[in-house]
Structure formats: C-alpha cells, structure tokens
Amino acid sequence: MSLSPVHLALVIDHPAQQFTRAFQLLAAEPGVRLDVYYWSTAERFYDADFRRSISWDIDLLSGYQWASPPAGRSLTGQLRWLTDQLRGSGPDVVI
C-alpha cells in the first residue's frame, strides 16, 4: 500500500454535468490526487451533432482541481500545453 495518494489525471473535452459529482467525490478521497484537464471550459459553444448552441448555467468546475489551455490556441498549442501540464504534475495514471 502506497503512503502517498495516487495521482490521477483525466483529460476530457469540456465540462459535463454527468461527470462533475464523480470528479468532486474522487477529489475528496484521501488516497487520490485528481487533476482534470479540459480542452475548453467555454460556457457556451456550438454542438455540431445537436446542431445548436449549448450552454450551461450551473457550476461544473468547483470541488476539484482543473485546468484548460488559454482560449484561441491551435490544436498544436493545446497539445503542447497538455504535455507541459502532464510533465509538470507527473501523474501516476492518465485517462
């Protein structure tokens, strides 16, 4: 059994209501250190699959550690940002 928490990094496109409570519960576990990395945290975006603008009006980001790249970065810039984040934080597991 490890004395230090397992450092878990989750990479996900954007905040989603169905995951928020799970992230909060994981972050509260003493044996887990959780970092969530989003590609975007825009509160309004166009969803091509639903062919409509989507927005969220509840707090999806409180209760856990998260980060996202500055808006307007290219895909290459986003990947570089994520790589730097992962190198800097050194997670045990990346999902």
Image (cartoon, rainbow, N blue to C red):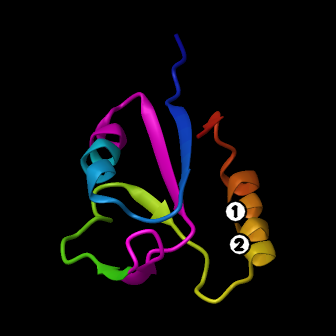
Q: Quadrant of residue 26?
A: top left
Q: Residue at x 75, y 66 (%)?
A: 79
Q: Which residues are magenta?
A: 25-51
Q: Are marks 1 and 2 in contact (CB under 8 Å)?
A: yes
Q: Which mark is residue 47?
A: none
The x and y percentages for residue 67 are 52, 67
Q: Which mark is residue 78?
A: 2
**Which quadrant of the figure contains the C terminus?**
top right
* Mark 1: few/some/many CA within 10 Å (<14, 14-19, 20+): some
| Left or right position of 3 against 58 | right
The three-letter code of the residue at mark 2 reads Gln
Q: Is residue 32 or residue 81 the one in the foreground? A: 81
Q: Is residue 12 or residue 6 the one in the foreground? A: 12
Q: Residue at x 25, y 75 (%)?
A: 56
The x and y percentages for residue 94 are 63, 40
Residue 27 shown in magenta? yes
The three-letter code of the residue at mark 1 reads Leu
Residue 88 shown in magenta? no
